[in-house]
Amino acid sequence: MLRIGLFLFSCWISSLHALTYQQPDGRLAQLVDAASSINWQLSASEKWLLQTEVAAYPELQMLSQQTAALAGLQINLSQLSAGLGRGYQRISIKSMQQATRYEWSANTGQALFSPRLSPDEQWLSVVVAEPHGLFIELMNLQTGKRKRMRQRLNAVLGIQYQWLADSSGVVAAVATSPDTPLQKALSIQPVVRESTGKAAKLRTFQHLLQSDNDAAYFEQLVQSRLVRVSTRLAIKTIAELPLYAFSLSPDNRFILTQQLSRPYSFRVRYTHFPRQAAIYDLRGHKLFDAGSLDLHESRKTRNGPRILSWQPHQPATLYWIAKSDDKASNDEIWQWSAPFSEKPHLLYTTAWRYKRLLWSDNKLAILYETDEETEQERAWLFAAGLSDTPQLWYQRHIKDQYALPGEPLLAKNRYFRQVLQRSESGELYIRSRDNTTLQARLLKMMPATQQQTLLWQSAADAEETPLALLTDETLLFTRQTPVQPPELYLKTVQGAVQQLTARPHPAPVLAQVQQQLVEYQRKDGVKLSGRLYLPGGYKPADGPLPVLMWAYPREYTSVTLAEQRTVPEQRFANFRPTSAQPFVALGYAVFDQVTMPIISTEGALPNDNFLPQLIANAEAAVDVLVNLGVAERGNIAVAGHSYGAFMVANLLAHTDLFAAGIARSGAYNRSLTPFGFQSEKRSLWQNTALYTKMSPFLHADQINAPLLLIHGEADANSGTFPLQSVRLFDALQGLGKQSRLVLLPFEGHHYQSRESLLHMLWEQQKWLSRHLKATPAMHAVH
């Protein structure tokens, strides 16, 4: 369904309240254009270092291109893509041994995506996104010269391309024609849906197919040509099909394809549509069928081979995960090896639901599984393959970060696939951290005995994170502090440390901001915390400041889990424009990352006591700010996004703690999400009282503080459709309450365009200045 309806709706709203996009205070505006985050990646040969710089926020015109909302996607018809994000503004690649360095910068209207080195590391490929298509470009790393594929990619279901193992070229999913097909004219006909009487409880999805015409158009848009393109840009077609995904076998003799098939659904996203898997050779001959998945309109585990991939350490062996018929076991792991003449072989049957599987270059493997009912996760070590008796590595609650022993490092093998990285003596490298100090650690662990030795530990005065471990155990890591963005360092086995990158603070005006972790308790003794940002030069003796508080509720099964601290104090504050942090530049105190745990009690689920605990959390946060002398009661605003917005509306409806609220992209009427929300699994009809009590829309008459509602018109997130904000505003307006509704055209659940972010900051700035009192201390530091 085309987006014309949303556009007309936005025009109607703007005609009622004539307002153009506004600019906030310059100290806020500069954050939208400030230098963005940088990431690094070391090549498999350890010869090249790749650096990527996230692109600036795009202009609104990039979002305003014609789109089609189909099968859970917002498809850019001009570009033939969906959900790309911002991409990169700049990509650079530097030799680790020589002075050679190449840089790739996006031109106006472009963004860069998916940089990949060829296996021989003679070529760097990058996807260049332009208003009318995505194109693969190749850079020769010996000469620095670039060339472009003529065919644009089909990125409706994501960017899909893969280098051939011999580095002679790539296999890619491209568009079937230079022009995007047009949707056929709609025929006027009744829209009919029928329920057969079989229960099928689903969360609320948006942008779904609405008609047979939609289904036909979606099928056209996902139709792709799978091609082989040489580095000389010669192109050969392998197959043409409605491609869901493809992958080359490690030895490059075969291609596994998964294609979408009918019947489609009007109730679920494309990921739940039927799929058929097949094996092709590189000349385009279809060799074998490799299983299928039926339409899945349920929240239960899907039948059939739901995860299908190549084993990374074998030349051409498929493995897949399928639900077991044995009720005592949840999943089966199957394998099927080339030449695919024998029947598939059952490797292992899990006791819980399969989560993931990490392979090594020999028989060692690590299997992760979860139990949904108990929310437990465990990992098994298989020293001699999945036919061996496993050893339990760990078991923990999925939210128990302290019980997580770490994450194994991965490295590329001879097939250029990710496998477990091991030392010469067979030890695994484990990235972990100290639960008390939150310092990062790098451990070596012998799988057979699980005996560990400490290889490296980060400094206490910074947050340091291992990035890559070189063959000689030289460590590449990042280092950041609250006032210094992440930089790249190299530490040799001998202990010498070298800084490889250096850059200034992205927002110098905020470099002097004071930060501190504030720990406190709510009235029942549960430990809480938040990060307090104060203007540079501010002293508590100066008196209180107006405060902006930002939070997001989370559910826990125990106090122990709720009290775990997981964010290091030394982390850099990046002052993202979508966060609350920027407002410290205007003289506000900002209390950010305020913990709002909702904890289950004996015989009850977390949401059974949602409101009492939410209120207790907020009361404790207000009390600690007042006791610190930073705030005064009645001069604090509360804000949040998504479930945080839901929290804001509830706090305004059930307390008088706050002078104002800002709620972005939230859901406020839980009867519109009747089959569950967040971690709530009970339906509206199973516990109507709970849904009623937790819906701030139904308590709008109790909201007395002014509430600013902001929502993206194209929000496709489950449950948070824009109508939620529109209807709450209608209720508040009808009840004579102070409120303001801002709908941002073309924006989804998270706002992307520069104009929208600037206007959002302006709206929030004006709302705070109108409803919070400026104090003498604010004037002194402002």
Image (tube, rainbow, N blue to C red):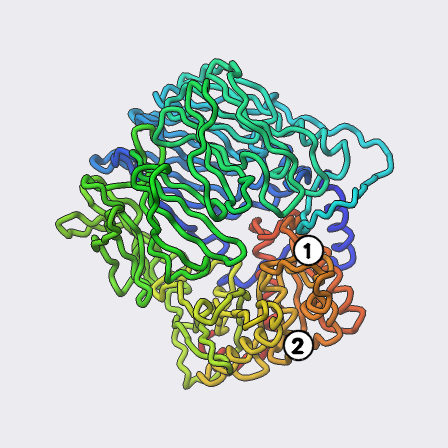
Amino acid beneath label 2: His
**Front-lying residue, 142 or 586:** 142
Q: Quadrant of residue 433?
A: bottom left
Q: Is residue 648 above or below residue 754?
A: below
Label 2: which secondary element: helix
Q: Quadrant of the N terminus?
A: top right
Q: Is residue 250 visible?
A: yes
Expressed as whole percent of the image width and height from the top left, the position of residue 779 reads 49, 78
Residue at mark 1: 675
Amino acid beneath label 1: Phe
State the mark number for residue 654. 2
State the mark number for residue 724. none
**Count of marks, rendered view:** 2
Q: Is residue 283 left or right of residue 769?
A: left
Disc 1 crowd, CA 10 A, few/some/many (<14, 14-19, 20+): some
Look at 52% across and 69% down and name the residue there: 597
Q: CA distance from mark 2 to mark 1?
A: 25 Å
Expressed as whole percent of the image width and height from the top left, the position of residue 296 reads 64, 39
Look at 47% across and 80% down and name the residue there: 525
Q: Is residue 574 above or below residue 608?
A: above
The tag earlier along the polypeptide, 2 or 1, is 2
Look at 51% across and 66% down and name the residue there: 557
**Front-lying residue, 201 or 334:** 334
Mark nearer the viewer, 2 or 1: 1
